[in-house]
Amino acid sequence: MGEIRLLGLEPRFTVVGDERSLSDGLGAESWDLALINDDIDGLSTARAVTIVHAADTGVPIIVVCSRESEEEAIATMRIGGRDYLLRNDLRRLGPVVLRELADSSILRDQGRVERALVESEARFRAIVEDQTDFVVRWKPDGTRNFVNRAYCEYFHGSPSSLIGTSFMDGMPDQHRGFIEETLEKMSVESPVVVFEPRVPRPNGEVVYHEWINRGIFDSERRLIEIQSVGRDITKQRKANEAERQQQLLVEVLRDTSAALNTTLDLDEVFDRILANIGWVIPHNASAIFFAEGETARVIRLRGWEEFGVDSMPEQVPLTAAEMAALTTMMSIGKPIVIQDTALDGRWQPGTRRLEWVRSFAAAPLFDESKLFGVLALFCKEPNYFTSVHLELLEGFASQAATASRNARLFETVSRSRSELRELSTQIVQAQEDERRRISQELHDGVAQTLTAVVINAELLMTQIVMTHDDRLVSRLRDVATLAKQTLQQIRDLSHRLRPAMLDELGLVATVGWFTKRFSDWSKVEVDFRVTGIDEERLEPAIETGLYRVVQETLTNVVRRSETGRIVVELVREADRMIVRIEDDESGGEPTGWRDSENDQPGTELLGIKERMTALGGSLTVSRSGSGGIRLDVEVPLVDAAG
């Protein structure tokens, strides 16, 4: 042990003298070195070496022998001994021990690495084999080196039938080109390439895969192998596509509904519907037409320019087959579809413009229970339309039918309103004509008669004065006074019905006269203003209507509120006439001037509103700056003149 201590080592050793103690010692502790002396009683050197080597501890064995047993020691080198020393010459013991300890350490480390590699490979293979994803290792020519269980099950093969074969055999050129393009993208710097190919299955089904491919390169940066991990993402793709389609459908339906709610222009709504159908049901061309007996009236077209069709005749005769199709849709109330026009006898169009069509779908447009039109889609690909497409088409047809009904209802209401407005105008005109007639009769008939009574009464008074009959003079004077008062009242009534000066002198003079008379009569100050008006006369209907606005408004103000001052202003602009009446001291809004529920002019102003509607004008009631009531009337001069 002294030789070993000279090396700076402090050995810890156990001395064994027989086979049993040797075996027990090897199992009890971990040893770095075994020195076997050839003079152990009852245990040969060869047997001792065999026992130590069989324990597979990796302990280096050094035999110490005499010169006589040197050959036996050499023989132990073949059964596990590392070296031998002569007992009478131990100078080499130190260097040999150091060498064996160093070699032993290296061997132990190498053993640990090898065991770790084996364990790691075992774990890797276990993980790969249990992996639900497809795992395959392959050469750049497509030859498979390894496949896991999931790969074999999915592609209906076994390791023995797949390994060593190339998946490029029989692959279409476009797919082969895609694989080659993927390999070109790989480099030492970017060894991972991900792609999602469409993969045809043996049963004809087309599925989607996701493959993560990692290139393996040699020391010269050459691609020698690829490890690919893949999975079938068809369900995920379909789910994502369904979600995208659902979101798109919601958007286009919202857009179409917005069109229905914001416009009654049937062409605009139909254009929006045809455009939106294209987002959820891709197709080549579409049309909306109304059925009118044995002809169809084309309403809107989309997508026909590609096929050289810029327009169609307004009226297109329907063939017997097309009439039968309409009858079928009428009876079942559902869309019809022709998947292949070349094979379906129902496809017998009456125009060569449809020769390119290979599949066709149409949905009926119903008004209540009556079929009045068709929404049709055309495609140059056979067997194109699905049941989902037909359901969507039916929904858009329902919207198109709603738009058509709304447009017809609006047309009916507009016609009724126009007729009512025309009737209202006729009534107002009849009132004015009647007032003119009554005023004229009062002026020309009753007023002249009373004038004659006054004149005759005054003549009689003159004669009676000459006869000195004071009683008759007094009575006749009373008759004359009463006749004058009645005459003045009739003249006032005549002017209120319709002042003759409105026809003779025009609007400004008549309103000025009326506001002065009104102020004298009501004791309310009226400030009459005129802006931008010259001597040019307006249309009689406009002058009459605006005069009635002033007359009726002033009467309502005085009747409904207590006020001390009213401003009446006539303003002439280039294309319109404005009447502005403002009560600047009213304590509150008079009842009847405004309907509180819909914020429209109330019952007191219905007459004025009707007059303005007939003239194409507008009426606005608001608060004045001082808290009173302000009324603004505007009448377009061009429209009125036209």
Image: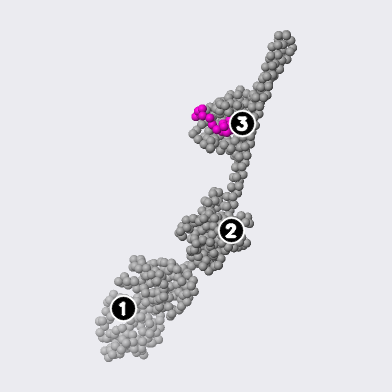
Quarter of the image with the N terminus in it: bottom left
Could you tell me if the residues under marks 2 and 1 are in contact, i.e. CB atoms within 8 Å? no
Q: Which residue is the site of mark 1?
A: 103
The residue range painted magenta reads 532-550
In the rendered image, residue 540 lying in the magenta stretch gets the answer: yes
Taking depth in this image into account, of 314 and 469 the one nearest to the observer is: 314
Total tally of numbered discs in the picture:
3
Residue 117, horizontal then vertical, whole percent: 38, 75
**Alpha carbon of mark 3 to alpha carbon of mark 2: how far?**
59 Å
Q: Quadrant of residue 475?
A: top right
Q: Which residue is the site of mark 2?
A: 294
Per the image, label 1 sits on a secondary structure element best described as helix
Task: Inspect the image, locate mark 1, and give the three-letter code of the amino acid beneath it.
Answer: Asp
Taking depth in this image into account, of 284 and 256 the one nearest to the observer is: 284
Q: Is residue 154 visible?
A: no
Residue in the image at 67% along x and 24% along y: 445
**Alpha carbon of mark 2 to alpha carbon of mark 1: how far?**
105 Å
Residue in the image at 69% along x and 16% along y: 456
Whether 111 is drawn above or below 296: the answer is: below
Foreground tag (3 vs 2): 2
Foreground tag (3 vs 1): 3
Q: Which mark is residue 504?
A: none
- Mark 1 is surrounded, within 10 Å at the Cα level, by few (under 14), some (14 to 19) or many (20 or more) other residues, namely few
Q: Is residue 436 visible?
A: yes
Foreground tag (2 vs 1): 2
In the rendered image, residue 162 lying in the magenta stretch gets the answer: no
Q: Which residue is the site of mark 3?
A: 552
Q: Earlier in the sequence, mark 3 or mark 2?
A: 2
**Alpha carbon of mark 3 to alpha carbon of mark 1: how far?**
125 Å
Task: Inspect the image, locate mark 2, and give the three-letter code of the amino acid beneath it.
Answer: Glu
Per the image, label 3 sits on a secondary structure element best described as helix
Task: Inspect the image, locate mark 3, and give the three-letter code of the amino acid beneath it.
Answer: Glu
